[in-house]
Amino acid sequence: MHPRAIVLLSGGLDSTTCLAWAQANYECIAISFMYGQRSTTELDAARALTQRAGVEHRVINIDLGNLGGSALTDLSIDIPEQEQEGIPVTYVPARNTIFLSYALAAAEVFDAEAIVIGINAVDYSGYPDCRPEFIDAFANMARLATKVGVEGKPLTFETPLLHLSKANIIRLGIEHGVDYSQTVSCYQADDQGRACGKCDSCRLRKQGFIDAGVADPTRYIP
């Protein structure tokens, strides 16, 4: 029997690849977040993906929209359609810290040995919580702040995509049987899950399929 892992799943390309990778190594519990994001069709994708995979799935409600501060949670801030200098307005303050904190609690509750997250330090949008230093620091904190850490059984933080290009993430997912037509990555997908094709997430995804030499199965808004 495989050890258990908590997998952070948004319903997008990266996290779906992580789930497929994790299923080969762990008994998985996927957790997703309704955090006040602009588009929630990614959650519909996550639900459908876990149902097909036979993976336990929990959706946690957090109202980060009440704070705002990001184009993903504040409708008054436009999603940029051109690449931005520095940290973009689509950065959600402390999002990965918050998500990992919930995953940490879930790992203790469900006796998991690992947490799997799809952060990527190669083809990413400049978010500070997608860097290796961030994961290392969080893992150190987790060793100090949890029962399992204090008892000498610290959790493993798995980041299988950390140093992969978007093209190699896609190749890894295909090796594990991922159907990318069923994933939603767009920051402003419509209510059918169709992508805008213009936001930073769409641009990175499009280029990833081009670089991987794989036909792009993404459904775009006409």
Image: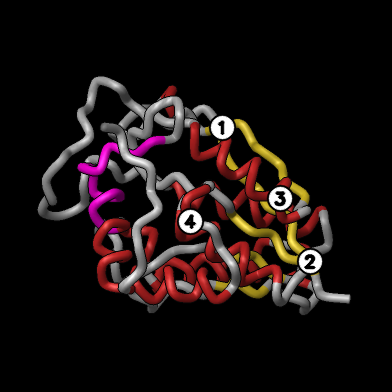
Q: Amino acid at mark 2?
A: Glu
The tag earlier along the polypeptide, 3 or 4, is: 3
Residue 62: numbered disc: 1
To which residue does mark 2 refer? 27
The tag earlier along the polypeptide, 3 or 1, is: 3
To which residue does mark 3 refer? 52
Using the image, determine if residue 75 lies above or below residue 161: above
Q: CA distance from mark 3 to mark 4?
A: 14 Å
Q: Mark 2 touching mark 3, by CB under 8 A?
A: no
Magenta stretch in the rendered image: 194-204
Q: Residue at x 69, y 59 (%)?
A: 6
Picture coordinates of residue 80, whole percent (x, y): 17, 38
Q: CA distance from mark 3 to mark 1?
A: 26 Å
Q: Describe the element under mark 2 as helix, strand or loop.
A: strand
Q: Amino acid at mark 3?
A: Arg
The tag earlier along the polypeptide, 1 or 2, is: 2
Q: CA distance from mark 1 to mark 4?
A: 27 Å
Label 3 environment density (alpha carbons within 10 Å; few <14, some 14–19, many ≥20): few
Q: Describe the element under mark 3 as helix, strand or loop.
A: helix
Q: Amino acid at mark 4?
A: Tyr
Between 175 and 29, the residue placed more toward the observer is: 175
Picture coordinates of residue 183, whole percent (x, y): 49, 49
The image quarter containing residue 73 is top left
Q: Nearer the viewer, mark 1 or mark 4?
A: 4
Q: Residue at x 11, y 45 (%)?
A: 82
To which residue does mark 4 refer? 180
Q: CA distance from mark 1 to mark 2?
A: 26 Å
Picture coordinates of residue 152, whole percent (x, y): 77, 79
Q: Describe the element under mark 1 as helix, strand or loop.
A: loop
Q: Residue at x 26, y 72 (%)?
A: 211
Q: Nearer the viewer, mark 1 or mark 2?
A: 2
Q: Mark 1 touching mark 4, by CB under 8 A?
A: no
